[in-house]
Amino acid sequence: MDPTPVPPAPLPVGRHVLAELTDVDAAVLDDVAALRGALHDALGAAGAQVRQIVAEAFAPQGATVVALLAESHASVHTWPEYATAHVDVFTCGDAADPELAVRLLAAALGASVRRLDVIERGGPAAAVTEPISPGLTRRWALGTVHHRATTPYQRVLIADTAHGVTLFCDDERQSAEATQLVYHEALFAPAALLAARCERVLVIGSSEGVVSEMAVAAGATRVDHVDIDPDCVRACAEHLPYGYTPGRLAAAERHEGPVHVHYGDGREFVERAAGRYDVIVVDLPDERPDEPEAQLNRLYAADFLAGCAQRLTEGGVVVCQAGSPALWRDATLRAAWRRFHDVFGPGGVVYAGSDEHEWAFLVGCPAAPADPVTTMVARLATLPVPPATIDAAWLRTRTVPPATLRRGFASAARHDDAGDGRHGRSAMSTPRRSRSR
C-alpha cells in the first residue's frame, strides 16, 4: 500500500516594504552612527529582533546601513546630495511590522515618505475581498501584484486579475483593463456632447488619467486635473496599461502641455478657482454614508455640486460618478439623483448608465438643451475622436433612468404639487443640508 501523501510544507510568509524618503538633511544622511541608531530603534519598536548591523560611509558622501534580523533584513542607502534615502525592510511572520518600522525611521530622520510599497511574499495565492453591499462581497483572485502601498489617504493595490491589470483602493475595484474604456467613455462622452464647448475641462479624482487624455482628444486646450493622492496617481501611471504614462504624468505635473496636474483637495480647488470650465468631471469612489467623516463625502454634498455649477462657462456641464443602478445597491445613486435635481432642476439632469450594472453617471446642465438626447446624437459625429463603446443607439437607450429614479421623482413632484400648490417644482428642490465637514 502506498504511504499516505505528505502535504507540502507551507511557504514562508512575509512582507517586504520598499520606501523612498525625501527632504532629509544632508548631514543626517552622512552620519553613519546616527543612521545605525535610528534604524536599530525603529526596528525594535516595530517588533523586530536585531541581531547585528553593519554600515559603511562612502566618499565623498552617502552611506549604506544593513541590519540582520531574526525575521530577515533591513537596509538604508542614502544620497545626501539629493536629500534622499531608500529603505527596505523584509520580515517573515507576524511578530514585526515592517511598514511601521519604515515610518518610525522616517520620523527619526525628519523625512517625508515619498513612496511606500508593500509586497506580500510567500503564502497562499493572494486575493481581495471587495465589499459590494451589506452582506455581500466579491472575491478577486490576484495574479502578479505590481504595486501595493499605504498612502496617507488609502490602501492602493494594482494587480493582475481575470479582468487584466486592476486598480483597487481600500479593497474596492476602481478600474480594470478589460472594462476601463466602457467606464470612462460613459463618464465623459455624454458630458462632452452636452457641453456647448469642450475647451477647458476640470477633472477631480480619476487617478488613472484616462479622462484627462479623453478631454484632450475631444479638443480641450486646458485640462486641470486635481487629485488628493499623488502616490496613487504616480502608481497608476507606472503600473496601469491605460491612462497616464510616467512621462506624460511628469509633464503634466510640470504644467507642460494641455494637462496640468494639481495635488490637493478638490473642494478647495473649486472654491478658489479663478477661471471657468466647459466641463467639470467628478470621478470618485462611491459615497460612504456609513462613514460620515470620510473626506470624499464632502465632494458629494449638494453645496459642492452647486459650487461646481457656479464655475461653469455658459453652456457648461458637470458630470459625476453616481453609483450603481442595481436595485440592491442603488442608495448612492438615488441620493445623487436627488442632489442633482436640487441644484439643476428636473429638466437639467441627464442620466447615463454604463453597459455594466456597476456604474451610472449624472450630468448637470444649467442650460440644458430642450432635447438632450437628440443634441448628443447630432453632435456625436463632430467629436474629433469618436468613442469606441458609445454610438447613437447607446445614447438613446442608456440615457433612460431606471424606473426607481423616474417613479421616485414623479411621486415626490405629485406630492409637492398637491401639498402646497406650487407647480413645476418638486419637494426635492428644497436645499438639503450638506454633510461636509
Image: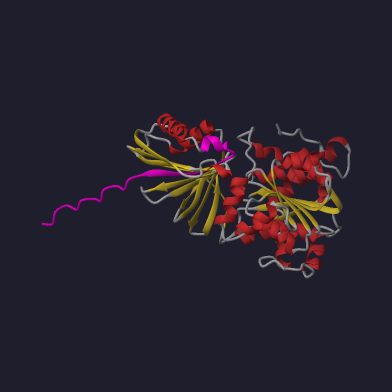
Horizontal side of 12 relative to 126 (left or right) equals left
* Span highlighted in magenta in the image: 1-29
Q: Please, which residue is most extreme toward the front here?
A: 60
Residue 41 in percent (x, y) is at 43, 29
Horizontal side of 218 relative to 145 (left or right) equals right
Between 218 and 110, the one lying in front of the other is: 110
Asked if the magenta segment contains residue 20, the reply would be yes
Q: Name the quadrant of the N terminus.
A: bottom left
Horizontal side of 217 relative to 153 (left or right) equals right
Q: Name the quadrant of the C terminus.
A: top right
Between 292 and 144, the one lying in front of the other is: 144
Query: With respect to residue 287, does 392 lie above or below?
Result: below
Horizontal side of 194 relative to 57 (left or right) equals right
Identity of the residue drawn at 47% across and 48% down: 128
Residue 23 in percent (x, y) is at 59, 39
Say whether residue 361 is visible: yes
Query: With respect to residue 164, does 288 lie above or below?
Result: above
